[in-house]
Image (spheres, rainbow, N blue to C red):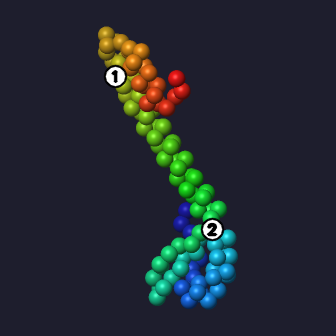
Amino acid sequence: MHELYQTLATGDLKSNPAAAFAKTMDGPVVVMSRSTPKVVMVAPNEWNSTARLIHELREQLNRERRLRIANQRYAARLADPSRGVSQEDLDAMVAEMGLPE
C-alpha cells in the first residue's frame, strides 16, 4: 500500500501545535522544512499498533526459522535410520520448534 501522507510546514507546527497534533488522528504527518521531509509524526495508538505488529511478525519469523531447522534435522535422521533419535535429540528439536515440553 502506497499512501500519500499529509504534510505540514515546520512554521505551521510552531504556530499551531495543537492543530498539527490533531492531524495525526487521520494518519501520519510528514513535517517539511524547505521542501525537505524532516520528521514523521504519528498518533501514539498508531505507533503502538505498528510496534506490536512488528514484534508479532518477528516472533512468527523466529518460529518459522526454528521449525525449518527442526524439519531439516528430522529429515536428515530419516535419511539415515541407523542414527536413531536420542531423547536428548528429541528434546532439542522440540525446544528449537518452540513447543512446550
Marks counted in the figure total 2
Residue 30 image position (x, y, % from top left): 54, 76
Q: Amino acid at mark 2?
A: Ala
| Residue at the image point whose x is 43% and y is 19% from the top | 90
Residue 8 vs 72, above or below: the answer is: below
Q: Secondary structure at mark 2?
A: loop
| Residue at the image point whose x is 58% and y is 87% from the top | 14
Residue 64 image position (x, y, % from top left): 46, 37
Q: Are marks 2 and 1 in contact (CB under 8 Å)?
A: no
Residue 57 vs 2, above or below: the answer is: above
Residue 11 image position (x, y, % from top left): 56, 89
Q: Secondary structure at mark 1?
A: helix
Task: Please give the residue where the numbered disc 1 appears in the rendered image.
Answer: 76
* Res 15 quadrant in image: bottom right
Residue 45 image position (x, y, % from top left): 65, 62
Q: Amino acid at mark 1?
A: Ala
| Residue at the image point whose x is 62% and y is 65% from the top | 44
Q: With 80 as the anchor, is 59 left or right in this view?
A: right
The circle drawn on residue 43 is: 2
Viewer-nearest residue: 74 or 56:
56
Visible in this render: residue 4? Answer: no
